[in-house]
Image (cartoon, helix red, strand yellow):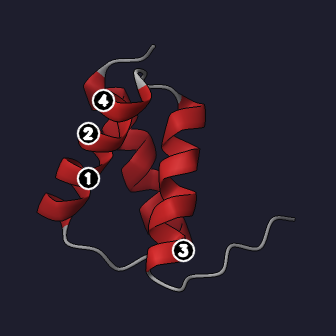
Amino acid sequence: NISQDVYLEIIHGYINKLNIKINNKDLKAKALEWSITRGARSGRVAWQFILEIASQNNKRIKLI
C-alpha cells in the first residue's frame, strides 16, 4: 500500500496525461471511495480507477 497522498498524485498524473475532464473534488472523493472498496491503495488500483473513469467519460485509452 502507498499513502493516500501518493495514490492521489498518481491519479492526478494519469488524469492530466490522458486529458480526462473531471472536477477535482469529485475526482478525489471517487478515487478514495474506489480504493476503500478495493481494500488497497496502489499503482494498480489507481490504474484500474483511471480505466473506469475513462470509460464513464467515453475516453479511449490507447496503450503504446
Residue named by callout 2: 32
Point out the tag, 3 or 2, that comes first from the N-terminus: 2
Q: Residue at the location (87% across, 65% down)?
A: 64
Q: Which amino acid does label 3 sit on?
A: Ser
The three-letter code of the residue at mark 1 reads Lys
Residue in the foreground of this view, choosing between 38 and 31:
38
The furthest residue to the top: 1
Mark sitting earlier along the chain (1/3): 1
Q: Do the residues labelled 4 and 1 touch (CB within 8 Å)?
A: no
Mark 1–mark 3 CB contact (< 8 Å): no
Q: Is residue 59 visible?
A: yes
Residue position marked by numbered label 4 in the rendering: 36
Residue at disc 4, secondary structure: helix
Q: Which of marks 2 and 4 is in front?
A: 4
- Mark 2 to mark 4: distance in Å? 6 Å
Q: In this view, which residue lies farthest toward the bottom?
A: 58
Give coordinates of residue 25: x percent, y percent: 12, 60
- Residue 57, position in %: x, y? 44, 82
Q: Residue at x 37, y 53 (%)?
A: 12
User: Which numbered disc, 4 or 3, marks the residue that appears first in the sequence?
Assistant: 4
Element on which disc 3 rests? helix
